[in-house]
Amino acid sequence: MSEKINDLLQIFIRYLQIERNYSELTIQEYQFDIMQFEKFMIEQSIQSIEDVEYLDVRLFLTTLYEQQLARSTISRKISSLRSFFHFLVREQHVTSNPFSFAHLPKAEKRLPSFFYEEEMEQLFATCEGNDPLSKRNRALLELLYATGIRVSECATIEITNIDFELSTILVKGKGRKERYVPFGSFAHDAIKRYIDEARSVLMKSSMKHSYLFVNYRGGALTPRGIRHILTKLIEKASLTGKIHPHMLRHTFATHLLNNGADLRSVQELLGHEHLSSTQIYTHVTKEHLKKTYLTHHPRA
């Protein structure tokens, strides 16, 4: 990477970390996309970031399509570079944003995957032990299913963020936005048991922090660590199909809507800025209603 672009990238990363408060995973994606475009610039003999024009952007788009990447991946890359150049314009490193006119490919309409209630029972059965790690895993799983919070949000929870009397938790979401999310009796009991009986065992005497979930060495669990634990639990439950930890969030929303929750409430619980982000779950629940109708109506 050229020294000039590397310097600009480092400034942009600091902006994403400090001003935008983006997660480590999101910042890595931005970095990867910008480095890929820098490689394209070298291949096309574009000497400087200031020399990039709209025609170069169109050619870059063509190369992405030729790689047969998913439309969602292409959209993310263009969005990353548009944000990067927008920042450079704002900071007066370049005079214009050549990505501002790039059309993003239409997103594929994929319905979010979720676990059925029977599958959730299988998951909970994988962490029924009395050892400290089983108690931690149970609390982790109960909390994620009870609240629908993101894995990245879960990693930032501190013990002081939990109000056991009101059964609510203060969640720090994207862009430093905070929200209170309620949790039920199953999560309440599992978290209390974990704190009282397991967390202090896992914590080492030299460890001093207030993060709720800790690893086997006593350090705070990272988002990557939480994903690893969830992936292992899913494998242990022998659940088939393409499964990922984020499905717990999808499951939370789908089960709420299936049981009569209104869309606005689910939007607030998920921390979605726009209702359109939540509306995708209504397609899943419509499928559920259709299946129920076809199964039980005498004239179906």
Image (cartoon, rainbow, N blue to C red):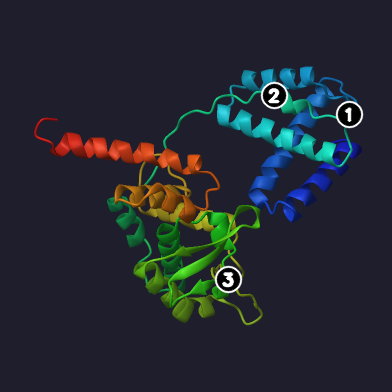
Mark closer to the chain start, 1 or 3? 1
To which residue does mark 3 refer? Answer: 158
Label 3 sits on a secondary structure element that is loop
Residue 198 image label = none
Residue most toward the left?
Answer: 298
Identify the residue at horizontal 36%, vertical 56% (top origin).
123
Mark closer to the chain start, 2 or 1? 1
Label 2 sits on a secondary structure element that is loop
**One can see residue 265 in this view:** yes
Identify the residue at horizontal 59%, vertical 72% (top origin).
218
Rounded to the nearest angstrom, the CA distance separating label 2 from label 1 is: 17 Å
Label 1 sits on a secondary structure element that is helix
Q: From what the image shows, is residue 60 above or below residue 243? A: above
Rounded to the nearest angstrom, the CA distance separating label 2 from label 3 is: 42 Å
To which residue does mark 2 refer? Answer: 102
Residue neighbourhood size for the residue with mark 2, other residues' Cα within 10 Å, grouped as few (<14), some (14–19), many (≥20):
some
Identify the residue at horizontal 43%, vertical 47% (top origin).
250
Mark closer to the chain start, 2 or 3? 2
> Callout 3, which amino acid?
Glu
* Placement of the C terminus among the 4 image quadrants: top left
x, y (%) of residue 288? Answer: 28, 40
To which residue does mark 1 refer? Answer: 50
> Callout 1, which amino acid?
Glu
x, y (%) of residue 154? Answer: 54, 61
Q: From what the image shows, is residue 33 above or below residue 199? A: above
> Callout 2, which amino acid?
Ala
